[in-house]
Structure formats: structure tokens, C-alpha cells
């Protein structure tokens, strides 16, 4: 059977480019265009439902494993956030942050994490864990950074969105739509 490999760790893959390239390879450009048009309509609906314009706000996505990691550019969730208008916050560089950019994950120290203050902080557990809901993410954060909810400004001000990493991390339209659903649910709280 044919095998399709996408080299996604090189920094050349961003947003839906891998899915679009696959659609082109398979002659499914029209189906991809329809899917993307539906997604863009959802972006507009979600943006209109937000209490303030995200085009003037920052975001940062955190992926928890046995440490805290900032998510780079290659994920559907990032595409959704940027299509809404959010701008990625770049953590201040210290000895634990090197090469933040197009990579998938960049480790952050607990100290750096504690100083973060994006307008929107998105946090998720590794997809290697069975529990990836809000309670599980909070427990993981408690283990890595005890007391985080008391000093992390986005936590104190209700600017955290908890998402399931299995739904939002692929560089696909489907992942981006799951992220839009999570943002919309968060905005209604």
C-alpha cells in the first residue's frame, strides 16, 4: 500500500499545510476547500461571540507532560487561535527557553511558567494520559507547580482554557474546529 510521510518537525509545516498537501496529492482539493470554508465561517461566529476582540490579545498554549512545555506553531489549535486574531506570546527567554518558534514543544521552567501573563492561556495534558479533562490538567499542574492557581494571573482572572490534547494537536481543520468549540464554551462561562 502507498505510504505518505510528512516531515513536520522541520518548521516548514504550519497550520493546515500538511492536510492541504495531502488533499492536493489525492485530488481532493475541492473537499478540502469546502471543509476550510466551513471552518472559516465558524471562526467568524466564534470571534463574534467573544466578549472582546481577540485581535488585540495574546495567547500561549501549554502542553503538560512530566514538565511544562510551550506549544510552537504546528497544531490545529494554534491555527484556530491565530485565525481568531490572537497573537502568540513569546515567553521571556531564560536558560530554559531556547529556540522558541516553529517547533512542536519547548520546555519551560516552573519559574518562567509562573510569570506568564497571556490574555488567553490554553493548557492540556499529554495525550499519553487517560485523563485529559480540566480536573486532570489541574492535578498535573498541582504536581509540577504547587499553588499555581494562587499566583498565575490567567488562573486568578479566569483566562485559562483547558482542552483535550487528543482533539486539538494535529495540524488539521478538525483539530482547529475542536479548539474553536473549546474557546466558545469557555467564553460562555
Image (cartoon, rainbow, N blue to C red):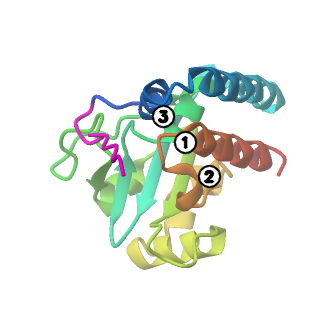
Question: Disc 2 vs disc 1: which is toward the camera?
Answer: 1
Query: 47 or 143, which is in the foreground?
Result: 47
Question: Disc 3 vs disc 1: which is toward the camera?
Answer: 3
15 relative to 136, above or below: above
Query: 68 or 25, which is in the foreground?
Result: 25
44 relative to 171, above or below: above
- Residue denoted by label 1: 77
Q: Quadrant of residue 65?
A: bottom left
- Residue denoted by label 2: 160
Compute the Cα span from label 2 to label 3.
Answer: 28 Å
Q: Which class describes the residues within 10 Å of circle 2: few (<14), some (14-19), or many (20+)?
A: many
Mark 3 residue element: helix
Q: Quadrant of residue 6?
A: top left
Query: 174 or 181, which is in the foreground?
Result: 174
Work out whether residue 117 can be spotted. no
Tell me where residue 74 appears, x and y as whole percent.
39, 39
Which numbered disc flags the more N-terminal residue, 3 or 1? 3
What residue is drawn where x is 76% and y is 23%? 41
- Residue denoted by label 3: 19
Tell me where residue 154 appears, x and y as whole percent.
58, 50
Work out whether residue 175 can be spotted. yes
Compute the Cα span from label 3 to label 1.
Answer: 14 Å
What residue is drawn where x is 38% and y is 55%? 113
Q: Quadrant of residue 176?
A: top right
Mark 1 residue element: helix
Tell me where residue 40 appears, x and y as whole percent.
69, 23
Specify whether residue 88 is painted magenta: no
Q: Is residue 93 left or right of residue 125?
A: left
Q: Is residue 161 left or right of residue 123?
A: right
Task: Write the start and end of the magenta stretch as one range.
Answer: 1-11
Amino acid at each position: 500500500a502507498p505510504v505518505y510521510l510528512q516531515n513536520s518537525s522541520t518548521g516548514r509545516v504550519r497550520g493546515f499545510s500538511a492536510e492541504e498537501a495531502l488533499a492536493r496529492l489525492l485530488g481532493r482539493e475541492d473537499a478540502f476547500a469546502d471543509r476550510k470554508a466551513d471552518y472559516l465561517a465558524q471562526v467568524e461566529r466564534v470571534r463574534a461571540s467573544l466578549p472582546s476582540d481577540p485581535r488585540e490579545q495574546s495567547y500561549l498554549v501549554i502542553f503538560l507532560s512530566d514538565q511544562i512545555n510551550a506549544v510552537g506553531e504546528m497544531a490545529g489549535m494554534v491555527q484556530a487561535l491565530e485565525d481568531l486574531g490572537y497573537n502568540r506570546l513569546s515567553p521571556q527567554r531564560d536558560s530554559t527557553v531556547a529556540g522558541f518558534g516553529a517547533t512542536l514543544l519547548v520546555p519551560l521552567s516552573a519559574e518562567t511558567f509562573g510569570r506568564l501573563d497571556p490574555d488567553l492561556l490554553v493548557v492540556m495534558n499529554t495525550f499519553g494520559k487517560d485523563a485529559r479533562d480540566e480536573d486532570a490538567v489541574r492535578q498535573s499542574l498541582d504536581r509540577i507547580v504547587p499553588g499555581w492557581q494562587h499566583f498565575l494571573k490567567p488562573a486568578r482572572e479566569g483566562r485559562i482554557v483547558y482542552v483535550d490534547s487528543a482533539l486539538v494537536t494535529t495540524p488539521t481543520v478538525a483539530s482547529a474546529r475542536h479548539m474553536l468549540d473549546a474557546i466558545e464554551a469557555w467564553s460562555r462561562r
